[in-house]
Amino acid sequence: MTDITQSPEVSTALAEGAPVVALESTIITHGMPWPDNLSTAWKVEEKVRETGAVPATIAVLNGTLHIGLSETELEALAKAKDVAKLSRADLAVCMARGGTGATTVAATMIAARLAGIATFATGGIGGVHRGAEHSFDISADLQELAQTDTTVVCAGAKAILDLPKTLEVLETLGVPVIAYGQDSFPAFWSRTSPLPAPLRLDTPADIARSHIARAAIGLPGGQLIANPIPREVEIPPAEIEPIIARATQEAAAQGITGKAVTPFLLDRIFDLTAGRSLTANIALVLNNAALAGAIATEIAKQLA
Ligand code: PSU
Ligand code: MN
């Protein structure tokens, strides 16, 4: 028997057509250190609630795919060691083996679509890694955006990636990359990058309209909303770049590959910035949760 469960709050909201925002869990287990990971997860849920939407954090617990976690479940996940990092490829195997795993952007999109949740907030999506011409390391998040119809709010691609190549692949896959309220493609810790965003929208209502228009014309795949980090906490490119370069070299020297790369880099950058990268990461996730809540509310309103 396959187990999929919704929290009572999420299930009621979905039945009423009320706005719901999906949230990923890899950022909790692999993206932030304890105990900031738990306090951030709580704050993100609170931020979504402030907009009038219901948060649905997604994870696999002992083989059951959970859409919406209780406080106790969230805390247990944040404390747990050796939690699997689940993308499209791993999700079903983890469920079959009764395992526990956190969902990446790709796996969270799959769960969100299954539940009928249109909007999803994260920090930064995975993308094309630096040196991908040798390593072939391209996140499954990109292909997922091409096939699963969720509107994903992020702060741009993490600057640890090769941003021009990430945008090229998204263009090839036909994924709309939409900067929120500015022309430049935001780079996670920094508000801007030298790259222009392919598309721009300025209001949650317009983003909701374009989400609904995609469905109306039968387009599979999601939209990627790139929301710049709040000004007060951004780390200028000149400051973060040498740190990223160093962390990337260390990863190569230590032979880190596959799904270990992103967690390794985030952890090293945390150390090398004396925690400043984490402060920025927390602020940008909260900022994305607020925008996702506003978009979800608009989608629910426009569909009512
Ligand atoms: N955003 C963050 N921290 C993270 C991630 C995103 O601020 O830890 C996670 C997401 O779950 C994303 C994953 O899907 O990193 C990408 O991993 P990979 O590069 O292995 O595909
Ligand atoms: Mn990868």
Image (cartoon, rainbow, N blue to C red):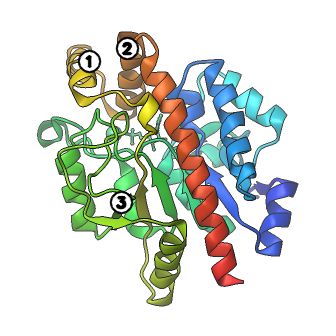
Query: Secondary structure beneath disc 2?
Result: loop
- Residue 87, horizontal then vertical, whole percent: 48, 47
Q: Kindly indicate the quadrant of the structure image that contains residue 113.
A: bottom right
Give the CA distance from mark 3 to mark 1.
29 Å
Q: Residues within 10 Å of mark 1 (few under 14, many from 20)?
A: some
Q: Farthest residue in the left direction?
A: 133
Q: Residue at x 48, y 74 (%)?
A: 206
Q: Is residue 101 above or below residue 82?
A: below
- Residue 225, horizontal then vertical, whole percent: 42, 59
**Quadrant observed for ligand 2 in the rendered image:** top left
Horizontal arrangement in the rendering, residue 283 relative to residue 277 (left or right): right
Q: Residue at x 12, y 37 (%)?
A: 134
- The residue wearing badge 3 is 143
- The residue wearing badge 1 is 243
- Residue 231, horizontal then vertical, whole percent: 42, 36
Q: Residue at x 17, y 45 (%)?
A: 194
Q: Is residue 32 above or below residue 11?
A: above
Instruction: State if disc 1 and disc 2 touch (CB < 8 Å).
Output: yes
Which amino acid does the dot numbered 1 rest on? Answer: Ile
Q: Earlier in the sequence, mark 3 or mark 1?
A: 3
Give the CA distance from mark 2 to mark 1.
8 Å
- Can residue 88 be seen from the camera position used here? no
Please name whichever residue, 256 or 192, is drawn nearer the observer in this view of the structure.
Answer: 192
Q: Residue at x 19, y 37 (%)?
A: 135
Q: Earlier in the sequence, mark 3 or mark 2?
A: 3
Which amino acid does the dot numbered 3 rest on? Answer: Gln
Mark 3 or 2, closer to the camera: 2
Q: Kindly indicate the quadrant of the structure image that contains residue 19.
A: bottom right
Q: Residues within 10 Å of mark 2 (few under 14, many from 20)?
A: some
Q: Earlier in the sequence, mark 2 or mark 1?
A: 1
Query: Secondary structure beneath disc 3?
Result: helix
- The residue wearing badge 2 is 273
